[in-house]
Image: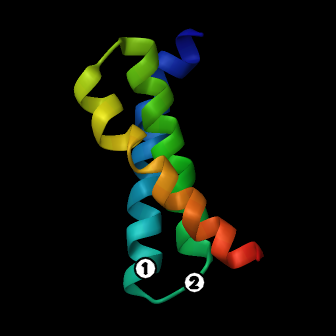
Amino acid sequence: MSFLKKYLKWISTFLVLTGILLTNLNIYPLNIYFHGLGVVGWTISGLLLKDKAILTNFGLQIPLFVIGIYKIIF
């Protein structure tokens, strides 16, 4: 569990920034997967740290990524 608390934010930040870069380079749908994984990581981090601001910001993004992934699959 200490690994998660120590490195989860850094890994999630890297994934979110990679997703943003892929969006700017118009590499679709890979951008949704990277950014979505980063958002899930930040949400888990917010749950572990009991940080309501992080949960509000990233938790509300999860349904948006689910919609995007749903549109890719179907």
Measured as percent of width and height from the top left, residue 40 is found at 53, 41
- For this orientation, the residue located farthest to the right is 74
Q: Secondary structure at mark 1?
A: helix
**Residue found 50% across the figure and 27% down from its top:** 44
On the rendered structure, is 57 left or right of 15? left
- Kind of residue sitting beneath label 2: Tyr
Which colour scheme appears in the figure? rainbow
**Residue found 37% across the figure and 83% down from its top:** 24
Quadrant of the rendering where the C terminus is positioned: bottom right
Q: Quadrant of residue 2?
A: top right
Q: Nearer the viewer, residue 16 or 6?
A: 16
Q: Which mark is residue 59?
A: none
On the rendered structure, is 66 left or right of 39? right
List the residue tagged with mark 1: 23
**Residue found 53% across the figure and 55% down from its top:** 36
Other residues around mark 1 within 10 Å, as few (<14) / some (14–19) / many (≥20): some
State the separation of the CA atoms marked 1 and 2. 7 Å
Q: Earlier in the sequence, mark 1 or mark 2?
A: 1
Q: Nearer the viewer, residue 21 or 55?
A: 55
Callout 1–callout 2 Cβ contact below 8 Å:
yes
Measured as percent of width and height from the top left, residue 6 is found at 45, 20
Q: How many numbered callouts?
A: 2
Q: Secondary structure at mark 2?
A: loop
- Kind of residue sitting beneath label 1: Thr
- For this orientation, the residue located farthest to the left is 53
Quadrant of the rendering where the N terminus is positioned: top right
Q: Quadrant of residue 32?
A: bottom right
On the rendered structure, is 49 left or right of 64? left
- For this orientation, the residue located farthest to the bottom is 26
List the residue tagged with mark 2: 28
Measured as percent of width and height from the top left, residue 23 is found at 43, 79
Q: Is residue 36 above or below residue 48?
A: below
